[in-house]
Image (spheres, rainbow, N blue to C red):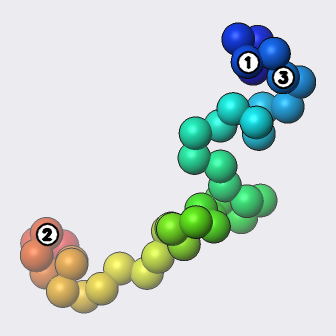
Amino acid sequence: MILAGTANIRDVIAFPKNQRARDMMTGAPTPVEPKQLKDLGL
């Protein structure tokens, strides 16, 4: 913020999230598929 000369942290956050901690551009986090769990051995 200081280097950018802005008073708002949202102007300089690389991956902004909404108030529910969701990334609106990618929709992350998303539910995990059972196949993903199996691939990871979980």
The image shows residue 4 at horizontal and vertical percentages of 73, 18
Q: Residues within 10 Å of mark 3 (few under 14, many from 20)?
A: few
Q: CA distance from mark 1 to mark 3?
A: 6 Å
The residue closer to the viewer here, 36 or 1, is: 1
Check whether the beta carbons of the residues at disc 3 and disc 2 lie within 8 A of each other. Answer: no
Nearer the observer: mark 2 or 1; the answer is 1
Residue occupying image coordinates x 76% and y 12%: 2
Check whether the beta carbons of the residues at disc 1 and disc 3 lie within 8 A of each other. Answer: yes
Identity, as a three-letter code, of the amino acid under mark 1: Ala
The quadrant in which residue 40 appears is: bottom left
User: Which badge, 2 or 1, is on the more N-terminal residue?
Assistant: 1
Vertical placement of 1 versus 36: above or below?
above
From the image, which quarter does the N terminus lie in? top right
Q: Quickly name the residue at label 3.
A: 6
Q: Quickly name the residue at label 2.
A: 40
Report helix, strand or loop for mark 2.
helix
Residue occupying image coordinates x 18% and y 86%: 35
Report helix, strand or loop for mark 1.
loop
Direction from residue 11 to residue 23 in the image, left or right: left
Q: CA distance from mark 3 to mark 2?
A: 42 Å
Q: What residue occupies the far bottom of the structure in this picture?
A: 34
Give the label on residue 4, or none. 1
Check whether the beta carbons of the residues at disc 2 and disc 1 lie within 8 A of each other. Answer: no
Identity, as a three-letter code, of the amino acid under mark 3: Thr
Vertical placement of 13 versus 32: above or below?
above
Q: What residue occupies the far front of the structure in this picture?
A: 4
From the image, which quarter does the C terminus lie in? bottom left
The residue closer to the viewer here, 28 or 1, is: 1
